[in-house]
Image (cartoon, rainbow, N blue to C red):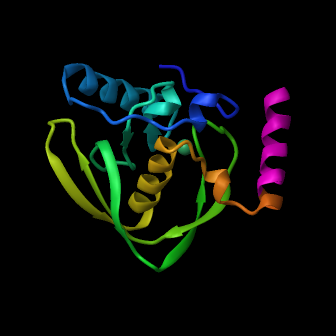
Amino acid sequence: MEIVTYGNEVLRSQAEPVRVIDAAAVKLAQDMLETMRAGKGIGLAAPQVGILKRLFVMQIADDVPRVFFNPRIVEQSEETVKFEEGCMSLPGIYADVVRPEIVRVHAWNEKGRAFTLEADGLLARVIQHELDHLHGLMFIDHLSPLKRKRVLKAWEEKFRA
Ligand code: NI
């Protein structure tokens, strides 16, 4: 699948719930995992492949691949942590982002089963980053205006090159 990059409206739109986790929905998740791996990413949200559905996939190193249909964060820690993020829709751009350290997320997996997962570390980070995409948000939105301007300037220079 083709990954949509920054500047495309689809990345700024609200994703719609997945009504049924059927074969087509599971196939979409598998295609997204493949696209993500091909691009050496660790997370990918449906809007990033131009599909406005509440779905994201992720896989950190040798961990199991994870599929989240209709995810929502049900609890998050007050403690925050700073961590460097990048995005397949903003290739080559990285910046430190502050987010809650621990999150509890509720979603449905590729078998159509509901689950709740408490995550910290990189797992929590990717979950929050990907969930943002379902609300039309990107990691640069968490930066200060000055930092965001700097990062976008770097992106534009890269884009023109
Ligand atoms: Ni991203």
Q: Residue 16, percent across and down?
A: 39, 34
Residue 83 sits in which quadrant?
bottom right
Residue 154 painted magenta: yes
Q: Residue 13, percent across and down?
A: 55, 35
* 156 displayed left or right of 136: right
Is residue 99 visible in the rendered structure shown here?
yes
Is residue 161 visible in the rendered structure shown here?
no
Which of the pair 85/24 is nearer the observer? 24
Instruction: Say which residue appears at 34% left-offset and 53% top-offset.
Output: 72
* 69 displayed left or right of 41: left
Residue 38 painted magenta: no
Which of the pair 70/62 is nearer the observer? 70
Residue interval drawn in magenta: 148-161
Ligand 1: image quarter: top right
Q: Residue 19, percent across and down?
A: 25, 31
From the image, give the main secondary structure of the stretch colored magenta. helix
Quarter the C terminus occupies: top right
